[in-house]
Image (cartoon, grey):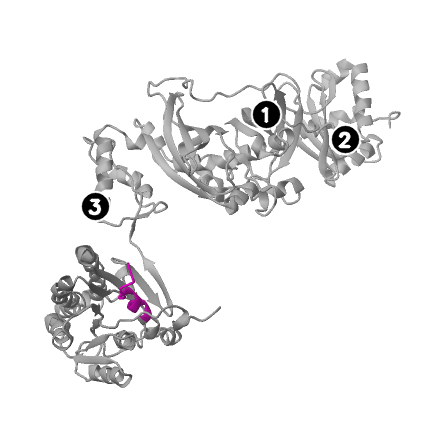
């Protein structure tokens, strides 16, 4: 890094300018005075000469004047108190005939805890800091107005901005200086009088013994002086700014205001403390905080709120939020729905520098979800009762992409209540969220159906309107493809970091209240896993081919369970699917589909490999055909998952209720009574009698889910001879 040099650009000069610095006998004030004088200014060095408690006298001002004169500069001392600000300004006028710059720097401390601050402690601090700065500024004001030029500095403190224990008097005065400076800046604008605030942290008589030594030694006042000097130069255009500076660093400080929340639905309605409590998280939300540059902006925004209320626009039925995302957000979401570096095709969802880096389509459910979750839309739609998070279930979700979204950007999402349906046992609230990019183009539309348990029977409509996207039943035939996707124990903990922080998915005590033994996986996580599998199977793993998806969340999933996604290719580039928990044969996503712009077909994962154990099932099929009555007597459905290389390579079903043996998942929407998972080679050993079922089970080679006792009835069917 190249060190800054004065001659790197034209030197800032103050030739012909008259500068008054109060409290200039030491510390910051001294450095200000020396720097201004070295750049050609004529300086009034004001200092009463007391210690930092405001007590005693000294010739501090004379010493600084001597330093300036010894260096060839021009300066005069002034020994007046800032509460006699007119006398300080008079010193400038008598010696130099004008005043161009006023640096209100004088200060003292009288630190006491709140209960111990005396009236004298309070008044003295305010006299020196706040009143003294006002009086000196007021005295300089007519001179600056007449010459149509002035630069004024107020000195605040982090104690004023943030507060500090034992400094109630000091912090109140210091923040008061910010308000004073704001008004001075406004009133001085037409006469080229600028006023700014410096918030310095510097080692001085006032901070010695308070700051740690290592910090005290680095907080050199001379490192702050150039910042103040620039603020006072004619080339600086800032006014009304708050600048914090310390140790060779500076920044601008802003007071900002959040987006806020309307606390009533019409101009005639009152505000209740209970409703304030209900929406308090929105009142205090600072995610969309903005800087207001003038009091008029605050008033104008309030007028806008009142106009909407007067026009009957219920703010609680619509909410607009901003959603910012980058590659880290997209990657975190992909990890949450099971993307893995062990699958080379997933790398484009996990690595921002991949030439095909893309965002999974279901990621764009988040803008609408977070907008609705962070609002009171659902509460505003149900006014006849109260409820909490434990009463809320996510019923259905629809997402449609109109444009291929960018891999990073800002989306503005407007969410509205689309419909409310009385389901008797609860209320179904359907919200619609439209997300627009920065050019105003509609990118995504989401419809979320929220079921509020116990909020039904309010004599409402019993069916959703035509604008709500319907579910689609699965075809009555065997799936065209089936894919198994394991979830992991930490999946909910990862997925929730994408924004859905409902404690039901992480906190065992909270999930217990909702009736679950352990925290469950987010329904939208299950949807993301499933749509990703469909995209891989029928969309060429290309998110740009995705158009829309819809699901119903019929049952919960526990982290660690394995999901099987059954898929049916339908006309018009639609793929219907269902998702089933393998361990329990429970259908967890129903009536689901994905619409593509174009379908790209991959081989059926359950029928693409020839295995040795195929001969075993061919033999079983023959024996069942030869003796249907004996097979039907077992009266059960068995699902075999045959693995190869540690992954499920093929499925076989022994439907002994109907005397059928076939390859693939259970047909007709039914469920297996018993599911068995075994490696291809171990299945051969089992059929030849070289491996006993009990031994295989105890050694973990045979995994059984469902009715274990039924598996014992299969022994006669498994034995084979010829076809091996």
Earlier-in-chain disc, 2 versus 1: 1
Q: Position of residue 295 (x, y in %)?
A: 21, 48
Q: Which residues are magenta?
A: 226-237
The residue labelled by disc 2 is 609
In three-dimensional space, the C-alpha distance between marks 1 and 3, rounded to whole angstroms, equals 56 Å
User: How many marks do you count on the picture?
Assistant: 3
Q: Is residue 452 visible?
A: no
Q: Residue at position x 27%, y 75% from top?
A: 40
The residue labelled by disc 1 is 577
In three-dimensional space, the C-alpha distance between marks 3 and 2, rounded to whole angstroms, equals 73 Å
Label 2 secondary element: loop
Please determine whether, in this image, residue 476 is positioned above or below residue 77: above
* The image quarter in which residue 532 lies: top right
Q: Position of residue 104 (x, y in %)?
A: 21, 69
* The image quarter in which residue 624 lies: top right
State yes or no: residue 229 in magenta. yes
In three-dimensional space, the C-alpha distance between marks 2 and 1, rounded to whole angstroms, equals 23 Å
The reply to whether the C-beta atoms of the residues labelled 2 and 1 are less than 8 Å apart is: no
Left or right: residue 427 versus residue 530 is left
Q: Residue at position x 56%, y 30% from top?
A: 546
């Amino acid at each position: 890094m190249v060190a800054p040099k004065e001659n790197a650009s034209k030197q800032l000069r103050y030739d012909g300018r008259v500068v008054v610095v109060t409290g200039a006998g030491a510390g910051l004030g001294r450095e200000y005075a020396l720097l201004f004088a070295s750049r050609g200014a004529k300086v009034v060095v004001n200092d009463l000469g007391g210690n930092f408690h405001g007590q005693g006298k000294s010739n501090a001002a004379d010493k600084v004047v001597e330093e300036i004169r010894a260096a060839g500069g021009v300066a005069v001392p002034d020994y007046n108190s800032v509460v006699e600000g007119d006398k300080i300004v008079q010193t400038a006028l008598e010696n130099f005939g004008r005043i161009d710059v006023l640096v209100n720097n004088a200060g003292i401390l009288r630190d006491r805890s709140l209960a111990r601050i005396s009236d004298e402690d309070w008044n003295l601090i305010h006299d020196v800091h706040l009143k003294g700065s006002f009086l000196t500024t007021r005295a300089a004001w007519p001179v600056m107005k007449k010459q149509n030029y002035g630069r004024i500095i107020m000195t605040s403190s982090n104690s004023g901005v943030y507060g500090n224990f034992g400094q109630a008097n000091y912090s109140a005065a210091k923040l008061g200086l910010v308000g004073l400076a704001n008004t001075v800046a406004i009133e001085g604008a037409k006469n080229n009088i600028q006023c700014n605030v410096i918030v310095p942290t510097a080692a001085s008589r006032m901070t010695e013994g308070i700051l740690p030594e290592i910090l005290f030694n680095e907080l050199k006042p001379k490192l702050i002086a150039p910042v103040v000097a620039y603020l006072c130069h004619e080339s600086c255009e800032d006014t009304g700014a708050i600048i914090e500076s310390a140790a060779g660093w500076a920044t601008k400080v802003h007071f900002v205001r959040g987006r806020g929340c309307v606390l009533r639905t019409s101009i005639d309605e009152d505000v209740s403390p209970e409703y304030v409590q209900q929406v308090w998280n929105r009142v205090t939300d600072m995610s969309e905080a903005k800087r207001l540059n003038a009091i008029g902006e605050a008033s104008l925004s309030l007028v806008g709120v009142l106009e909407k209320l007067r026009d009957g626009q219920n703010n609680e039925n619509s909410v607009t939020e901003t959603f910012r995302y980058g590659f880290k957000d997209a990657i975190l979401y992909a990890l949450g729905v099971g993307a893995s570096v062990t699958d080379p095709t997933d790398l484009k969802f996990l690595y921002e520098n991949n030439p095909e880096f893309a965002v999974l389509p279901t990621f764009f459910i988040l803008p609408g979800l977070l907008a609705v979750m962070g609002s009171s839309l659902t509460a505003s739609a149900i006014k006849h009762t109260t409820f909490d998070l434990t009463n809320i279930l996510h019923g259905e979700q629809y997402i449609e992409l109109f444009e291929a979204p960018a891999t990073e950007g800002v989306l503005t999402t407007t969410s509205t209540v689309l419909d409310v349906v009385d389901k008797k046992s609860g209320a179904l609230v359907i919200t619609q969220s439209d997300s627009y990019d920065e050019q105003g183009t509609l990118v995504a539309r989401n419809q979320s159906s929220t079921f509020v348990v116990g909020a039904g029977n309010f004599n409402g409509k019993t069916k959703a309107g035509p604008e709500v996207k319907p579910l689609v039943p699965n075809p009555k035939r065997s799936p065209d493809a089936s894919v198994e996707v394991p979830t992991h124990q930490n999946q909910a903990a990862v997925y929730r970091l994408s924004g859905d922080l409902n404690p039901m998915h992480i906190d065992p005590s909270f999930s217990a209240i909702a009736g679950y033994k352990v925290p469950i996986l987010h329904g939208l996580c299950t949807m993301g896993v499933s749509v990703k599998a469909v995209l891989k199977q029928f969309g060429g793993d290309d998110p740009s081919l995705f158009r829309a998806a819809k699901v119903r969340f019929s049952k919960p999933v526990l982290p660690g369970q394995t999901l099987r996604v059954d898929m049916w290719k339908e006309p018009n580039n639609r793929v219907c699917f269902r998702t089933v928990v393998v361990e329990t044969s429970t259908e967890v996503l129903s009536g689901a589909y994905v619409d593509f712009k174009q379908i790209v077909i991959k081989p059926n994962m359950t029928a693409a490999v020839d295995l040795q154990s195929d001969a075993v099932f061919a033999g079983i099929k023959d024996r069942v055909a030869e003796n249907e009555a004996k097979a039907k007597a077992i009266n059960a459905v068995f699902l075999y998952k045959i693995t190869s290389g540690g992954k499920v390579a093929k499925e076989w079903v022994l439907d002994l209720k109907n005397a059928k043996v076939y390859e693939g998942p259970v047909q007709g929407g039914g469920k297996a009574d018993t599911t068995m998972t075994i490696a291809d080679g171990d299945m051969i050993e089992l059929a030849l009698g070289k491996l006993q079922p009990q031994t295989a089970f105890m050694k973990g080679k045979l995994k059984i889910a469902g009715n274990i006792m039924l598996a014992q009835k299969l022994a006669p069917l498994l034995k084979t001879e010829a076809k091996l």
